[in-house]
Amino acid sequence: MSSHPNRRRGHDGPGRPKRSGPSQSGPNKYRDKEIDPARIVARDVLRAVRERDAYANLLLPKLLRERKITGRDAALATELTYGTARSLGFLDAVISAAAGRPAHEIDGTLLDVLRLGAYQLLRTRIGSHAAVSTSVDIARSENGMGPSGFVNAVLRKISQRDEQLWIDELAPSMMDDRIGNLAFTYAHPRWIAEVFYEALDRSTGELQAALAADDDRPIVHLVARPGQISGEELALISGGDEGRYSPYCVYLPEGDPGKIDAVREGFAGVQDEGSQLVALALSRAEVADDAGRWLDLCAGPGGKAALLGSLAHIAEAHLDAVEISEHRAELIDKVVDGLPVRVHVADGRDSGLEPGFDRILVDAPCSGLGSLRRRPEARWRRKPDDIPALVTLQKELVTEALRLVKPGGVVVYSTCSPHRAETVEVIDAVLADVDGITQLDARPLAAGDVFDPETLGAGPHVQLWPHRQDTDAMFLAALRKD
Ligand SMILES: C[S@@+](CC[C@H](N)C(=O)[O-])C[C@H]1O[C@@H](n2cnc3c(N)ncnc32)[C@H](O)[C@@H]1O
C-alpha cells in the first residue's frame, strides 16, 4: 500500500534553534527556551495528555496564546501535537521495536520526546537530522546526557526505515487480518476499526477510506447563526467557503476562528456541519399544531442549543436546554445569550419539566468515536468497556424524551458515534420497549431542500461519515409519538 496521502504535507520546520553551539558543560546549559518553541509546546501538551488526561485540542491553543507562539511556529506546533497524539499507538509500536523494550516501560518524559521525534520522522516531511537533533536537545535539556543518548539511538534506528517499511514489519498481515492491518496503518486501535467495519456493512474498502479520513486533520466548520448572519455573509467575511449540506455552514480551511469578528460577537460559532444537520433535522420535522415548545435534553456545551435557539427565535418558539453538569450549563448560557432559551441544570432522565414538548433533541452522551479526527488523543483513551454504561444511559434518555414529547411531536436522537450499539441498536431497543412510536425517515429532515436525501443511504436513520460527507460521523434517528 502506498503511503498515507495526508501525511506528507508537514512542513520543514523552523530549522535549528538559535543557540551558541553544543553544550560542553552538562545538561543545564540547554534551556527549553533555546530550543524551538513549537516542539517544546508540543512536548508539554503531549506530557499533559499522558500524565493528567488533558485534551490536546483545549490545552494547545491556550499554551500557544500564553507563550505568544504564532504564525509558522504555531502551525508547526499544531501539526506536531495533534499528529503525534493521533498516532500514539502506531508510534509506540515502532518505538518499542526500535528500543527493544515496550514503550510503556520507558520513562514517560523520554517517551513524549521519542513520540514527537518518531512522528516527525515517519509522518512528516521534516528532515531526519532536524527531527533527531531537536529531540536529542529536548531530552538533554531536561534529562541529561545519558537519556539524550538513548533518544538519539532509538530515533536513529527509527529513521533507518520509512513509515511504510515499519508498517510492513509490524502490522498484522493483510492476508490474515485485513482489519488489523488497516487499523495499524491508519493509527487506530483495532477495536475501533472493528466498530467502523460493522457500521459500514462490513466493507473493508469503505473501512480503509473511513480510517484514512479519520486520520486526517479536518478543516474548521463554522455555523452562521440564523437570523443574525447568513452563511453567504459569513463565508465572505471569513474568507471561507459555503457548506454543501447545511445552509449555515462555512468551511474555514485556514486561520483562527477566534479572530473572526462574527465569531467573537456571537453571530457565528465553530460547529461541525454534521451537528448542524442534526439541529436542522429537528427543526424541519412536521409537527401538527406546533406550539413552539422545544427541548434539548443533553445540551452542554450548547452548540446545537445555540443553533436551535436561533431557529426557535425565527419560529417564535422557545427552547428548554437541560444539562447535568453545572460547568457545561454555564457554557450553554454563554452561547445562547439573547436567544429564547432557558437553561436547566438537571438530569435529563428526571428533569421535572412538564411533558407536552413539540420537538425534543436527545444528543446523547456517547463514546465520541465519530469525532476522533477533531479530538486527537481520544482514540487511544476510549475503551470498549465504556460502551455498555453509555448505552444504558442513552436508552433511558430517549425513553424519557418519548414520555416528555406530545402525541404528534418528534424526538431526534443523535450521537457523535457510528457504533451500532449506540445508534441503531438503541433505537431498535427503545422501539421494542415503548409502544406507539413511529420511526420517521430522517434523510429528508437532514437534507431539507438543500441536497438529495438519497445520498444519505437507505434510511430511515442517517449515518454521516468523514469519508462520505466530510463531516463528523454523526448518527441521527427521528421518532414520532403516535
Ligand atoms: C454529546 S454532549 C451534547 C452536545 C451538545 N448537544 C452540543 O451540541 O453542544 C452530551 C451532554 O450530555 C450531558 N449529560 C450527560 N448525562 C446527562 C444526563 N443524565 N442528563 C442530561 N445531560 C447529560 C453531558 O454532560 C454532555 O454535556
Image: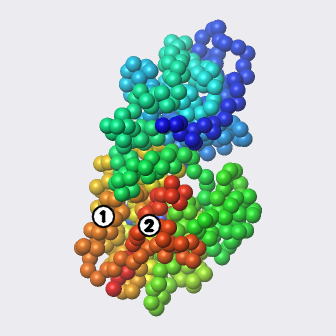
- Quadrant of residue 20 in the image? top right
Residue at left 40%, top 64%? 364
Who comes first in sequence, dot 1 or dot 2?
A: 1
The answer to whether 51 appears left or right of 402 in the picture is right
Q: Amino acid at mark 1?
A: Glu
Residue at left 46%, top 41%? 186
Circle 1 residue = 425
Kindly report which numbered mark, 1 or 2, lies closer to the viewer in this rendering: 2
Asked if residue 442 can be seen in this view, the reply is yes
In this rendering, the answer to whether 227 lies above or below 236 is below
Nearest to the observer: residue 444 or residue 135: 444
For ligand 1, which image quadrant applies?
Answer: bottom left
Q: Amino acid at mark 2?
A: Gly
Report x, y in % for residue 332. Answer: 53, 65
Q: Residue furthest bottom?
A: 289
Nearest to the observer: residue 408 or residue 170: 170
Report x, y in % for residue 52. Answer: 45, 39
The answer to whether 417 appears left or right of 134 in the picture is left
Q: Considering the numbered disc 1 on the image, is that residue within a helix, a strand or a loop?
A: helix
Between the C-alphas of marks 1 and 2, the distance is 18 Å
Circle 2 residue = 457
